[in-house]
Image (cartoon, rainbow, N blue to C red):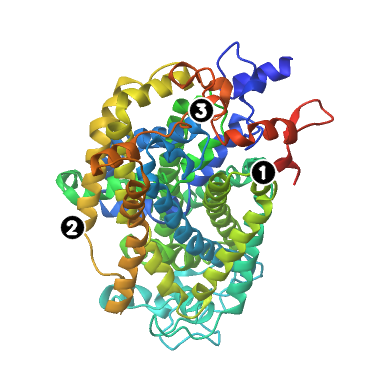
């Protein structure tokens, strides 16, 4: 009895309410609140925290960038995070089911699914490349250390020569290769790590339309990535909730190890100062504020559907308000911490090259697979540090990929909703994983990096902003802010704080609209190094972005057409009002205005025709006396 009581408090249950009443037998729940928090942290903290934020920070005023960054976190990031968590938790539905709140806008949920599909395809390709580097680091000498390999060109200039011993006579090497003069005067230097990346790992073609051959080692690692993701999600949140105890925490161990090693190196302080030194004049630059708002928005994973999905597995009275603050702050603190790790090593590298830190700083794949790996070759026992770094990237990527796949699977299962699909949810997970692997194969060709960057730049850019803005407006102004505030009070026991009420109604939509305008104004055609994408590729990118947004008006038109009413206004009114089964998923939570009247079909709110079958067929008694779902036994 004490164990059940303790579990109830751990999950944020209202004191005095039996924990077993919160158990959603049909869908399942997180084992405890820690699993949800760790999963959400793993989802929000991804590769962008390591390879994008530090670069944005030093490019936008160093320490001065922190001010607009945290302003945007408070007025936009945390409120949107709380909104999505509370939205999914209240209805206990994925990104499609929650739109019972206003069925005409269910296209927003389909848009979230399209975005998650695009991201899931290319994100796992990045993870598979990290897997490849992880395996190739298991050697005595890192293969991108020297310029004496078959794939190297005459323009390759390494920091070390094969004859250099473990004492690393950097002064002699710098004089021998004249690296400082080469970089400062010409700005051209092809490092062994860059040639390894372009000429050996990718064997990159000369055009996005020239696919060339499939890189079999990358394809094999892609298959491994999908197998790992599938196995971790084989029992849904019941299995992934256990895996995140490692995948969400160990990256912090690796970051700390790399940080301690980094700050002990010569030149590390210069790199950190370059990262943090404030340039207060840039605070007045609109681009700085736009970058801060965009980074907060994309980093937290808003409008992907993942937050709604993960929160839908919470118990009804879980304190998601507290969780949203903890997870959002943890995400941003991780970004800042990762900056110290990255720039301490880059400062060390710049010091020994005799160049400015800006010459070696990079972001995105260029940082993860070129700049940082080259810096690691300068360290004693470099393979060890390389293994740790790429293992960290793998775990950061997997934490996000788990939620992307679960978002799609949950949306499919919730939408069909019958006992058969719930019983065979594992097969649905496998099917989605297989399709994701097949769609990722073109990204393992010699033109794969072009397609990966095209998807990264267009598939999840301004479309996410539009989706988030429509979601916010729908909940606050179509469904009604007073109704939503009452829903949260019924769920948490207290209404959302006044600050969040104001942000949801005014500040957050305004900031989202600002991000959209900023994105449009700052748009530049995509390029990769010296390669400029052709017009047809850019058009294809816009079509990818449009494919998620177009779901919203198309489904709205379909819903209006199918709604009852003699006039357009009557159809519109019926299309936007909540379904009769909108509200808490479990009947014991449907109180107040959700309480069914006598004889009303609302007595069984979700799939009422299956309610009796659910109670009889889906609950079995385990050896420990607790109820388990058939889904968890698959």
Q: Which residue occupies 53% across, 85% down? A: 213
Secondary element at image label 2 = helix
Q: Nearer the viewer, mark 2 or mark 1?
A: 1
The residue under label 3 is: 584
Q: Residues within 10 Å of mark 1 (few under 14, many from 20)?
A: some
Q: Which badge, 3 or 2, is on the more N-terminal residue?
A: 2
In this view, the residue farthest toward the right is 623
The answer to whether residue 233 is visible is yes
Residue placed under numbered mark 1 in the picture: 419
Which residue carries the number 2 mark?
Answer: 521
First in sequence: mark 2 or mark 1? 1
As displayed, is residue 624 above or below residue 164? above
Which secondary structure, mark 3?
loop
Cα separation between marks 3 and 1:
20 Å
Which image quadrant is residue 205 in? Answer: bottom left
Within-10-Å neighbours for mark 3: few <14, some 14–19, many 20+: many
Q: CA distance from mark 3 to mark 2?
A: 42 Å
């Amino acid at each position: 009895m004490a164990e059940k009581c303790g579990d109830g408090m751990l999950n944020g249950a209202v004191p005095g309410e039996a924990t077993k009443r919160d158990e959603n037998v049909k869908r399942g729940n997180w084992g405890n609140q820690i699993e949800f928090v760790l999963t959400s942290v793993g989802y929000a903290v991804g590769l962008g925290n390591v390879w994008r934020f530090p670069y944005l920070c030093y490019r936008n005023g160093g320490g001065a960038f922190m001010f607009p960054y945290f302003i945007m976190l408070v007025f936009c990031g945390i409120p949107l995070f709380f909104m999505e968590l509370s939205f999914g938790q209240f209805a206990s539905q994925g990104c499609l089911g929650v739109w019972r709140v206003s069925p005409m806008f269910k296209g927003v949920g389909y848009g979230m699914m399209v975005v998650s599909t695009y991201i899931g395809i290319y994100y796992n390709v990045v993870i598979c490349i990290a897997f490849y580097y992880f395996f190739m680091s298991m050697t005595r000498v890192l293969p991108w250390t020297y310029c004496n390999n078959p794939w190297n060109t005459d323009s390759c200039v390494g920091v070390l020569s094969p004859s250099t011993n473990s004492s690393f006579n950097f002064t002699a090497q710098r004089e021998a290769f004249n690296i400082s003069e080469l970089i400062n005067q010409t700005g051209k230097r092809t490092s062994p790590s860059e040639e390894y990346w372009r000429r050996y790992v990718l064997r990159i073609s000369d055009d996005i339309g020239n696919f060339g051959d499939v890189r079999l080692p990358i394809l094999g690692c892609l298959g491994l990535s999908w197998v790992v993701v599938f196995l971790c999600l084989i029992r849904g949140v019941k299995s992934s909730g256990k895996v995140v105890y490692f995948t969400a925490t160990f990256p912090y161990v690796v970051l700390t190890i790399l940080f301690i090693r980094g700050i002990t190196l010569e030149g590390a302080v210069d790199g950190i100062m370059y990262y943090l030194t404030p340039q207060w004049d840039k605070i007045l630059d609109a681009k700085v504020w736009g970058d801060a708002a965009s980074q907060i928005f994309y980093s937290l994973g808003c409008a992907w559907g993942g937050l709604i999905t993960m929160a839908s597995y919470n118990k009804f009275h879980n304190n998601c308000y507290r969780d949203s603050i903890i997870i959002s702050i943890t995400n941003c603190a991780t970004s800042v911490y990762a900056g110290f790790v990255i720039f301490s090593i880059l400062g060390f590298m710049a010091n020994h090259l005799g160049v400015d830190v800006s010459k070696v700083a990079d972001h995105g794949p260029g940082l993860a697979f070129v700049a940082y790996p080259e810096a690691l070759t300068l360290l004693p026992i470099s393979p060890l540090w390389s293994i740790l770094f790429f293992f960290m990237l793998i775990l950061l990527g997997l934490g996000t990929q788990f939620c992307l796949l679960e978002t799609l699977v949950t949306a499919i299962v919730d939408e069909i909703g019958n006992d058969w699909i719930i019983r065979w949810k594992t097969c649905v997970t496998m099917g989605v994983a297989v399709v994701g692997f097949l769609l990722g194969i073109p990204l393992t060709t010699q033109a794969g990096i072009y397609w990966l960057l095209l998807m990264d730049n267009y598939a999840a850019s301004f479309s996410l902003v539009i989706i988030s803005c429509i979601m916010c407006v729908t909940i606050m102004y179509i469904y009604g802010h007073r109704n939503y505030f009452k829903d949260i009070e019924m769920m948490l026991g207290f209404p959302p704080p006044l600050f969040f009420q104001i942000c949801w109604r005014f500040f957050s939509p305004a900031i989202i609209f600002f991000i959209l305008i900023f994105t449009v104004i700052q748009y530049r055609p995509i390029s990769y190094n010296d390669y400029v994408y052709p017009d047809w590729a850019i058009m294809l990118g816009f079509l990818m972005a449009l494919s998620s947004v177009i779901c919203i008006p198309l489904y709205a038109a379909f819903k209006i057409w199918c709604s009852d009413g003699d006039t357009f206004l009557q159809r519109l009114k019926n299309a936007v009002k909540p379904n009769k089964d909108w509200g808490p998923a479990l009947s014991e939570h449907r109180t107040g205005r959700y309480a069914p009247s006598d004889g009303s079909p609302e007595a069984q709110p979700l799939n009422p025709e299956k309610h009796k079958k659910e109670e009889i067929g889906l609950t079995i008694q385990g050896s420990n006396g607790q109820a388990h779902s058939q889904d968890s036994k698959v």
